[in-house]
Image (cartoon, rainbow, N blue to C red):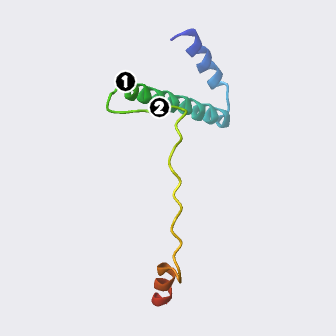
Amino acid sequence: MSSVKELLHNTIESMDDEDAIELLNFARRLKEKKDIWLVSERLTNNPNFKIPSDKSKGFKTIVPIQGKGIPASELLIKERR
């Protein structure tokens, strides 16, 4: 075992359970970030996928149509009661 891992192991041994759980959660978040980065790297090199640039405008906002009268959902609720 490397000296860094030995030092980490010794530090974990001296922690209480609450601190050890917090450290474990932190390590899991680091691994998830690394996994996400590896997937995005793989997709970047795949010509079938296009990852948008940071300058992309995003999705177009769509405003729902406002109808006249009582909405059908309200009529249905009244009918069921």
The label number, if any, that marks residue 32 in the structure image:
none
* Residue at the image point whose x is 62% and y is 25% from the top: 12
Q: Is residue 54 left or right of residue 41?
A: right
57 over 12 or under it: above or below? below
Q: Identity of the amino acid at label 1?
A: Asn
Of 79 and 19, which appears nearest the observer?
79
* Residue at the image point whose x is 49% and y is 27% from the top: 34
Of 8 and 25, which appears nearest the observer?
25
Of 2 and 54, which appears nearest the observer?
54
Q: Is the residue marked by circle 2 packed among few (<14), some (14-19), or many (20+) residues within 10 Å?
A: few
4 over 14 or under it: above or below? above
How far is mark 2 from mark 1, CA to CA? 15 Å
- Numbered label tally: 2
* Residue at the image point whose x is 41% and y is 30% from the top: 39
Q: Identity of the amino acid at label 2?
A: Ile
Could you say where residue 76 lies in the image, as x and y percent from the top left? 46, 84
Q: Is the residue marked by circle 1 packed among few (<14), some (14-19), or many (20+) residues within 10 Å?
A: few
Q: Which residue is mark 2?
A: 36
Could you say where residue 4 lies in the image, as x and y percent from the top left? 58, 13
Q: Are marks 2 and 1 in contact (CB under 8 Å)?
A: no
The label number, if any, that marks residue 45 in the structure image:
1
* Residue at the image point whose x is 34% and y is 27% from the top: 46
Dot 1 falls on a residue whose secondary structure is loop
Dot 2 falls on a residue whose secondary structure is helix
Of 23 and 30, which appears nearest the observer?
30
